[in-house]
Amino acid sequence: MKVHILVDNKVVNLRPGGMMAEWGFSAYVGNILLDFGTSGIAFRNMQLLKLPKPEKVVLSHGHYDHTGGIIGYIGDKVKLYAHPHAFLPRYFKGVQVGIPFTREFVESRFEVVEVKEPVEIEKNIWMLGEIPRRHEEALLEESYVVVDGEKQEDRILDDTSLAVKTDKGVVLVLGCCHAGLRNTIEWAEEVVGDEVKFIVGGTHLIAFKPDEMGEIVSWLDRKVEKIAPCHCTGLINEFILKEKLGEKYVAVGSGSVFEV
């Protein structure tokens, strides 16, 4: 089972040459595209990797760095799965950080399917829907979302991930993991009915200071066989994961392939 990283904040592989990075995330899972990155380079990188156009699309949540690349999509009007909140106006420290397009624009390019509950969108591939929050979340300070014309604290309820069942355990593919890493792992295991053994994608551990990482990393060490963190993990916290988890840590970036 392969996960192609189309967009990350960095490039770590020499080949294929010409891969581009940006602040954002996009991944290709089976025939499913998870997120678009920020500017549209996901589709340029997809061509360099010689991947076919996706048959379905999933939005992990409605932030600009996961949705802005919609502008680069040219193709058939495939299904796009998203939580209803993904299309709401949202702000961080007074700056608009939500999806930079109207819902009408998105619907002109995709068949939008609203999802709040877990759904198996391909055999053995689940979109996790709205994730229960039992442990720490990874939210943004001074942020709000506009619901029915009223400002509300933005708990980023639309944040979701993909869970892929394999004969080696569950592969968890994260967009940004604002719902919290432990919450997302436990929910994926409940939905799929198997243990999460592999993690790839944005962990949003950047929300935690280095001295807050100890308990989370120890828990991960007991749980997973491989973790390939990117995007919103933060370089310092990636160094901590590498130091504490050793060979369980896998370095990835735009153009990398995570395989189990």
Image (cartoon, helix red, strand yellow):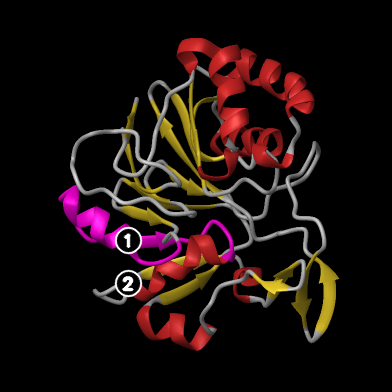
Q: Secondary structure at mark 1?
A: helix
- Residue located 78% across and 24% down the image: 211
Q: How many marks?
A: 2
Relative to 35, 215 lies left or right: right
- Residue located 32% across and 61% down the image: 41
- Residue located 71% across and 38% down the image: 183
In the rendered image, residue 241, in percent from the top left (x then y), is placed at: 58, 21
Q: Which residue is mark 2?
A: 72
Q: Amino acid at mark 1?
A: Ile
Q: Compared with residue 116, is residue 260 higher up or lower down, i.e. above or below?
A: above
In the rendered image, residue 143, in percent from the top left (x then y), is placed at: 78, 64
Q: Quadrant of residue 136?
A: top right
Magenta span covers which residues? 38-63
Mark-to-mark CA distance, 2 and 1: 7 Å
Q: Which residue is mark 1?
A: 41
The reply to whether the C-beta atoms of the residues labelled 2 and 1 are less than 8 Å apart is yes
Q: Compared with residue 239, is residue 96 higher up or lower down, i.e. above or below?
A: below
In the rendered image, residue 28, in percent from the top left (x then y), is placed at: 34, 49
Specify whether residue 44 is painted magenta. Answer: yes
Relative to 89, 227 lies left or right: left
Mark 2 or mark 1: name the one nearer the start of the chain.
1
Q: Secondary structure at mark 2?
A: helix
Q: Amino acid at mark 2?
A: Gly
Q: Compared with residue 111, is residue 123 higher up or lower down, i.e. above or below?
A: above
Indicate which disc residue 166 carries.
Answer: none
Q: Quadrant of the C terminus?
A: top left
In the rendered image, residue 259, in percent from the top left (x then y), is placed at: 32, 28
Q: Quadrant of residue 191?
A: top right
